[in-house]
């Protein structure tokens, strides 16, 4: 059986997670993973609950301790999930220039200082006003060239608005195509994030249509992450998702 890596996880070093480092490691072993990469949040917006929370030294102390504890049974890579906001690009560059990490994942979570999955976000916004700034910011993130790995590309499909109806890829195809073209041109790699499966979706972030388009545009590799915030999320849906990716001809790589 293919040995899998979970490349997107959070521990109590992230402001919104409940899992300890050891608990994630134990879950990973139980699930039969080859390795993990714990990607704590780094946020530069004072409006974000995670602002000022990141502590590289405390994180690295846990990495070193768990590497010793689990030895060859589990590979542990270092990583981070940076919330991309164009207005904080200088802070992001400074951060990336300061810390040494194996894996850097770029994700868009907020627009105008509001989390896009916050119930408040759709208030007073038409569907276009809600979605377009997200695609614009995602494009800017890819074009910044700062990230080798692009997190949960269609995360906004979980937007909490009854009025907008179901997410339809074809409605946003010009944006998505442009973003994917830039991803492929720049040699970046899409993340396939299975947390969508625990948020009521039947497909990961991004969904299969987007992954197929990525492949058609020349994309060859993806990384898989569960975006675990608790031990029970580790490796969620990995076997099925990995099998589907294989069928599509997208190769799995890891941090
Ligand atoms: Zn994220
Ligand atoms: Zn995350």
Image (cartoon, rainbow, N blue to C red):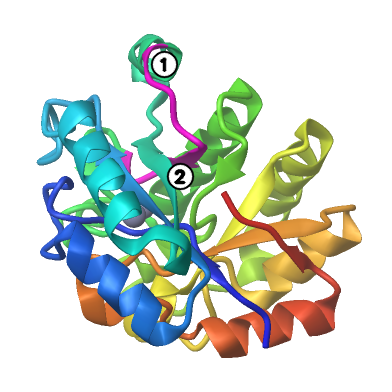
The x and y percentages for residue 144 are: 59, 22
The x and y percentages for residue 198 are: 33, 83
Alpha carbon separation for disc pair 1 and 2: 16 Å
User: Label 1: how many residues lie within 10 Å, few (<14), some (14-19) or many (20+)?
Assistant: some
Q: Quadrant of residue 215?
A: bottom right
Q: Is residue 253 visible?
A: yes
The disc label shown at residue 196, or none: none
User: Label 2: how many residues lie within 10 Å, few (<14), some (14-19) or many (20+)?
Assistant: many
Mark 2 CB near ligand 1 (8 Å cut): no
In the rendered image, which quarter contains the N terminus? bottom right
Rendering quadrant holding ligand 2: bottom left
Q: Is residue 162 visible?
A: no
Asked if the magenta segment contains residue 106, the reply would be yes
The x and y percentages for residue 18 are: 10, 64
Q: Quadrant of residue 8?
A: bottom left
State the residue at coordinates (34%, 51%).
67
Q: Marks 1 and 2: which is nearer the front?
A: 1
* Residue 114 to residue 174: above or below: above
Asked if the magenta segment contains residue 153, the reply would be no
Q: In this figure, which residue is indicated by the disc labeled 2? A: 134
Q: Nearer the viewer, residue 170 or 38?
A: 38
| Horizontal side of residue 179 vs 247, given as left or right | left
Mark 1 CB near ligand 1 (8 Å cut): no
Find out whether the residues at labels 1 and 2 contact each other: C-beta distance under 8 Å: no
Q: Nearer the viewer, residue 68 or 166?
A: 68
State the residue at coordinates (75%, 51%).
177
Mark before the other along the chain sequence, 1 or 2: 1
State the residue at coordinates (82%, 54%).
219
Q: Which residues are magenta?
A: 98-110
> Does dot 2 land on a helix, a strand or a loop?
helix
Q: In this figure, which residue is indicated by the disc labeled 1? A: 89
């Amino acid at each position: 059986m293919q040995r899998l890596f979970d490349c997107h996880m959070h521990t109590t070093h992230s402001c919104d997670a409940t899992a300890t480092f050891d608990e994630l490691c134990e879950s990973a072993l139980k699930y039969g993973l080859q390795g993990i990469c714990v990607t704590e949040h780094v946020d530069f917006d004072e409006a974000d609950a995670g602002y000022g929370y990141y502590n590289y030294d405390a994180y690295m102390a846990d990495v070193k301790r768990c590497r010793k504890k689990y030895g060859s049974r589990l590979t542990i890579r270092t990583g981070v999930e940076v919330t991309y906001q164009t207005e904080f690009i200088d802070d992001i560059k400074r951060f990336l220039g300061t810390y040494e990490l194996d894996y850097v994942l770029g994700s868009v979570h907020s627009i105008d200082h509001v989390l896009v999955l916050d119930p408040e976000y759709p208030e007073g916004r038409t569907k276009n006003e809600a979605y377009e700034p997200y695609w614009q910011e995602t494009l800017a993130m890819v074009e910044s060239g700062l990230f080798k790995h692009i997190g949960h590309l269609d995360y906004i499909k979980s937007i909490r608005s009854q009025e907008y109806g179901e997410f339809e890829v074809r409605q946003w195809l010009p944006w998505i195509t442009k973003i994917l073209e830039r991803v492929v041109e720049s040699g970046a790699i899409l993340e396939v994030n299975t947390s969508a499966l625990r948020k009521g979706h039947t497909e990961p972030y991004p969904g299969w249509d987007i992954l197929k388009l990525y492949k058609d545009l020349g994309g060859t590799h993806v990384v898989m992450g569960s975006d675990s915030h608790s031990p029970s999320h580790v490796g969620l849906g990995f076997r099925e998702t990995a099998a589907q990716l294989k069928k599509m001809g997208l190769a799995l790589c890891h941090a």
